[in-house]
Image: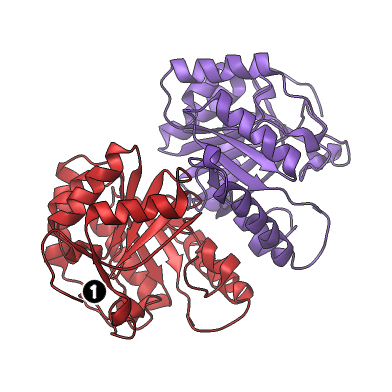
Chain colours: A purple, B red
Amino acid sequence: MGVVTVSKIPVIEMFGPTIQGEGAVIGVKTMFVRTYGCDYRCSWCDSAFTWDGSAKDKVRMLTPEEIMAELLSLAGNNFDCVTISGGNPALIGEAMGTFIMGLHERGIQAAIETQGSRWQEWFNDVDVLTISPKPPSSGMKTDWEILDGIMGKLHDKGKAAHSLKVVVFNEGDYEYAKAVHKRYPEVPLFLQPGNEDVTEEGDISVRLLGRLEWLFNQVIVDPEMNRARVLPQLHALIWHNKRGK
Amino acid sequence: MGVVTVSKIPVIEMFGPTIQGEGAVIGVKTMFVRTYGCDYRCSWCDSAFTWDGSAKDKVRMLTPEEIMAELLSLAGNNFDCVTISGGNPALIGEAMGTFIMGLHERGIQAAIETQGSRWQEWFNDVDVLTISPKPPSSGMKTDWEILDGIMGKLHDKGKAAHSLKVVVFNEGDYEYAKAVHKRYPEVPLFLQPGNEDVTEEGDISVRLLGRLEWLFNQVIVDPEMNRARVLPQLHALIWHNKRGK
């Protein structure tokens, strides 16, 4: 990985333009920048190559300016949004803040997803911030004290554009999502059915739609979830388990 | 249909709770109230029974209080949102305003979709207002002067929660959607692939996802559509052409 300095970001892939398939800005055209490294090891992670070492030789340490140049060379003026995903992009410090400022100078939105295990000051500058705590099926344990701290800081800033997202594989996960909703009732909550096999080849849309219907039906009969929003992963419905889409 | 008075609303169906499948509040749990009557005759209308006379005997003239009572008896406290669709609900006058006030008194949101052929004062009270002008494939002709008037009034009120939605069946419709986006660049625009056969039985999800991919690909290569959002009809992906879902 070369020498890590504070001014560089470990990038494992960049692609796009494509359509954001999930969460608060579902349906928006976006570029993707995926950072390397994660403090979690979710059992069903669909991007395990960002932390399991299998693609370590693909990681490049890039400055914010280099990332911007590469996005522009990939897509020209054909995007107004960049989604930064991981891995956990919240492991990156001030270099990410510099990158986000660079996006804003060009009138480009920054959307970021992170699990809420770590705060960064640049969260305040993100246009669309998704906090996605991981349910029991992931095998991870939520540190509620840290999550409370992050949600509290976002609330104090009066930031309208942050939301929560919980991936739901089973009833235990659904109960976890309800606990999240009760804990932060004013924050928009998105529920997303999990993809139970991220390596299956071919068209997986029928399986995924079956899980979406299951999750719809959980919420439909549950008066405590009247304000939650249930959304699929559109990219997985259309492009299945292919990477770089 | 009995005697039509200003204080009653012609209702053809009520159902729910279900999940809103499209547009600005995609994924939200909602009840549906469908009003009878339309000033349009779209060739591909998926609710032609609201205007073609085939279900005229199902229409009931109901007061706002009667509609509210029926929603509560259908769903109890198991909803926070009511979607009013048609037909064209903008044909209804002050009775609709009364109904919306009744929703708000109970902390319930009102979401409405209309084609933008007619203004009503109660538009100002709608929480989620979707203006959905119809593209050429519908066979209808947009009256731009009227649409400009409606969009201007919504803009003047500084209402954040209104958006535009255009259903797209083909390239001509896509060009129409671009014209709408250029005309009202500050209003969020949702694009939705059309359902080319609203009577086909069985699982139509593969066909619909194919059209979603086509529309994704139009937008992905088009720098003039960087801010448009492309969304499917989730209910049609899951429940296909069944009514009352």
Q: Looking at the image, which residue is at 77% across and 33% down?
A: A136
Chain letter behind tag 1? B
Q: Quadrant of residue B34?
A: bottom left
B215 on left or right of A137: left
Q: Which residue is drawn at 52% across and 74% down?
A: B242
Return the x and y of residue A205 as percentages of the image width and height.
69, 65
**Amino acid carrying mark 1 in the image:** Gly
Q: Which of A146 and A1 is in front in this view?
A: A146
Q: Mark 1: few, some, or many residues within 10 Å (few <14, many ≥20)? A: many
Q: Give how far across and how far down residue A1 sits, in percent.
A: 82, 29
Q: What element carries label 1?
A: loop
Q: Position of residue B103 (x, y in %)?
A: 30, 44
Q: How many labels does the image show?
A: 1
Q: Is residue A175 left or right of residue A75?
A: right
- Could you say where residue B83 lies in the image, as x and y percent from the top left? 36, 55
Please say whether residue B163 is visible from this viewpoint: no
**Residue at 57 percent of width and 31 percent of height:** A181
* Vertical arrangement, residue B10 with respect to residue B94, above or below: below
Q: Kindly identify which residue carries mark 1.
A: B37
Q: Looking at the image, which is closer to me, A83 or A226? A: A226
In the image, what residue occupies the spot 16% across and 70% down?
B143
The reply to whether residue A102 is in sight is: yes
In this rendered view, identify the residue nearer to me: A54 or A219: A219
Q: Where, by quadrant of the figure, is residue B201 drawn?
A: bottom right
Q: The N terminus of chain B is located in which quarter?
A: bottom left
